[in-house]
Amino acid sequence: MSYQVTIQPSGHQFNVESGQTILEAALDAGFALPYGCRNGACGACKGKLLAGEVDYGEHQAGTLTAEDKKKGLALFCCAVPRTDLAVEVKEVSAAKDIPVKTLPCRVERLERLGHDVMGIWLKLPSSERLQFLPGQYIDFLLKDGKRRSFSLANAPEEDSLLELHVRHVPGGQFTEHVFNAMKAKDIMRINGPLGSFFLRESDKPAIFVATGTGFAPIKSILAHAFHHQVDRQMVLYWGARTLQDLYLAELPGQWQSARANFSFVPVLSRPAPEDRWPGRTGHVQAAVLADFADLSGCQVYACGSPAMVDAARKDFLAHGLPEDEFYSDAFNFQ
C-alpha cells in the first residue's frame, strides 16, 4: 500500500511505499528535503504536517518533543505515513539551502583506483549524514591549520560512506600521506559541503568535460541523474595523457552501454606506443569543438586542471556557448 504526499508550498507530490519514511520516498522521487543524521537525532529534517497522520517512528525525545507534536511537527527521516499527507517544508534547491558542517570521520577503506589515484571512503559518526548536491566538495582540516579540498565522487543516494578520488602529487604533503601513511580507521576532520558545481535544471544537452580526477564530481552528478532517470542528452569527454591515466574508464563505458541518452568520449593527449590507442587524441576541449561547432544550445560542466578549464571556457564561448551556461571547478594542487 502506498500513500501520496504533497509538499507545500511547492505543490510537488510523491508516493510513499509501505514501510518507507517520508524522507526516503522524497529523495527517491527526486525531491531534496533537508536532512542531517537520517536517524532521528539532529532535527534537520523537521517539518510540519498540514494534513494526515503519521507513525512518528523511533527518535530522540529531545529532538521531537510532545510539544512539537502538538504543533504538528514531525521528523521526516523517521515518520511513516498512515494516510495521505500534506507537509510543509522548504526544499533544497541550491547550495545555500544546505548547512556546512565540521565533522569527524573515520577512514573506512583505501583502494588504488589507478597507478596514481587513491580512492578513500570515509564514514561519519552514526548520528550524522552529510547532505550535499552532487558535484560539491569537502575540505580536510589538517592539524597545521591548512585545508585540502576533494570532490565527493559518490551520489547523495549512496551516502553511508563518502567517496573521494585523490591523485598523487609528488612532493605534495597531503597526498604523500594518503599514499604512504594513511590507513583504515584513521580519524580525520572534514568541513562541507562546499562549492557550486552541480547540475542545473534544463532541457539543454549537458556536456561534461573532465581531466584527471575531475571525473570524481562528474561521477557523482551522473550517478545521481541516472538514479532519477533524467532523460536529457548528456556526454562526457574525459581527457588524460595516457591510457593508464583513465583510472575508471570502464564505468562511463558501462553507462554508455546502458543509457541511450549518454555517451562517453575518452581523449588521450599523449598516448603511449603500448596503448595502441584507436580513439581520439589531443586536447579534450578540442574534441568537444570537433563534435559541436555551435554550442549555443548547450550547457557545459568542466572540471579538472585550471589550464583545461580556462582554455575550454575561452574556446566554448567563442563557439556560441552562453557565458551563464559554463559551470566549472578547477583543481588547483596545493
Image: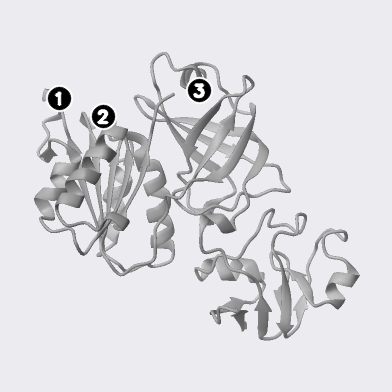
* Residue lying at 50% horizontally and 21% vertically, measured from the top left: 174
Residue placed under numbered mark 3 in the picture: 178
Q: Marks 2 and 1, Cα distance to the nearest angstrom?
A: 9 Å
* Residue lying at 52% horizontally and 18% vertically, measured from the top left: 177
- The secondary element bearing badge 1 is classed as loop
Q: Are marks 2 and 1 in contact (CB under 8 Å)?
A: yes
Q: Which mark is residue 282?
A: none
In the picture, the quarter occupied by the C terminus is top left
| Nearer to us in this view, 255 or 59 | 59
Q: Is residue 142 above or below residue 78?
A: above
- The secondary element bearing badge 3 is classed as helix
In the image, what residue type sits under mark 2? Gln
x then y, percent, for residue 8:
62, 79
Residue placed under numbered mark 2 in the picture: 244
x then y, percent, for residue 221:
40, 53
x then y, percent, for residue 47:
71, 70
Q: Viewed as shown, does residue 280 lie left or right of 135?
A: left
| Residue 222 appears anywhere in the view | yes
Residue extending farthest to the right is 66
Q: Earlier in the sequence, mark 2 or mark 3?
A: 3
Q: Is residue 270 above or below residue 260?
A: above
* Residue lying at 56% horizontally and 22% vertically, measured from the top left: 182
In the image, what residue type sits under mark 3? Val
In the image, what residue type sits under mark 1? Ala
Q: Which mark is residue 272?
A: 1
